[in-house]
Image (cartoon, rainbow, N blue to C red):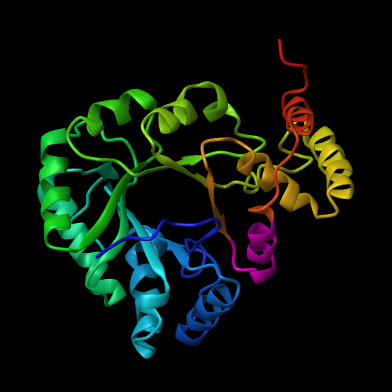
Amino acid sequence: MKQKPISSPVAGCMRWGKWGAGYNTAEYRNMIEQCISMNINSFDHADIYGDYTTEEEFGDALKEDKTIRSKIKLITKCGIQMVTDNRPQHSIKSYNTSKKHLIQSAEQSLKNFGTDYLDVLLIHRPDPLLNPEEVAEAVQLLQQQGKVLEFGVSNFMPHQVNMLKQYVPISYNQIELSVICLSPFTNGILDNCMENKITPMAWAPLGGRMLTDDLHPHFRSITHTAAELAEKYATGMNEILLSFLHTHPSGIITVIGTTKPERLEQAKKASNIRLTREDWFALFKAATGEDVA
């Protein structure tokens, strides 16, 4: 099956279920359909979301209308083992990237969604015990069986990516990145993505709940600069903060974890905005509090 590229933004589903809005099946379906109507067709999950319940709830909505699956792309992550009533065999929160666990996790996600393939499967966190040969064997088997189309990682540093890619192709690295989480611009993560033709996905691209007057020391300078640029570009502040990421040459895809369709609509508009260099550096300065060297 030929894979079309994931496009920005991706709808992040972490808060759609138990960990947030607590959608029922009709509400899941309504949100999915609203996304499709805005030409947002990719949905980001992880097996652990909602204490291992959100994938299946999302899948219940897909099962109501079998035509939806062909219109969307499903991204999910695995490798974290949570302590929860839904997994009584887990005695401690840990990571598991063994061949057996990756295959079992992917097959469970397929069952949860009611589909026969995942568009993208990501390893959720770097595992100190990761065996690259086992990961490669698992991914290769899943891809040969047509159960996983593309493979990637999440929250991996460049040296971890470089090690693993010697054994298995990596298409994505999903990382925390925003105007208040600037380290990937300078710590080699985005450079590594460009070097290896890996597409970066940015989670919490608007800073999550951290971009507030109480929690971030440069909140006022960031919002002041973003407001000025929003007026200049005839758009909104959220669009400016997202365009800050889209302007980077690595082709960053934003994952918008929201239950508000208007936030997704803003993100869709932002995907077409590119800041000038000076405007980009104005936001960078606002976020750091100082000029570049």
| Residue 264 falls inside the magenta stretch | yes
Quarter occupied by residue 129: top left
Q: Quick check: 189 left or right of 182?
A: left
**Does 19 sit left or right of 150 as displayed?**
right
Image quadrant occupied by the C terminus: top right
Which x, y percent locates residue 201?
Answer: 48, 46
Position of 9 compared to 52: left or right?
right
Quadrant where the N terminus sits is bottom left
Residue 286 spot, x, y in % from top left: 78, 29
* Total number of numbered discs in the rendering: 0
Q: Residue 244: horizontal and vertical position, in percent? A: 68, 40
Residue depicted at x 54% and y 83%: 30
Position above or below: 53 against 131:
below
Q: Residue furthest bottom?
A: 64
Q: Position of residue 148 (x, y in %)?
A: 23, 59
Rendered position, 194 above or below 293: below
Confirm whether the magenta stretch covers residue 57.
Answer: no
Quadrant for residue 51, please give it: bottom left
Residue depicted at x 39% and y 89% = 65
Q: Which residues are magenta?
A: 258-269
Q: Is 216 in front, or is 13?
A: 13
Q: Residue furthest front?
A: 2
At 12% across and 62% down in the image, what residue appears? 145
Comparing 97 with 277, the one in front is 277
Q: Viewer-proximal residue, 110 or 9?
A: 9
Would residue 82 be seen by someone viewing this image from the given angle? Answer: no
Task: Please state if 14 lies on the left or on the right of 230 as rendered.
Answer: left
Overall secondary structure of the magenta stretch? helix
The answer, for residue 126, to whether it is visible in the render is yes
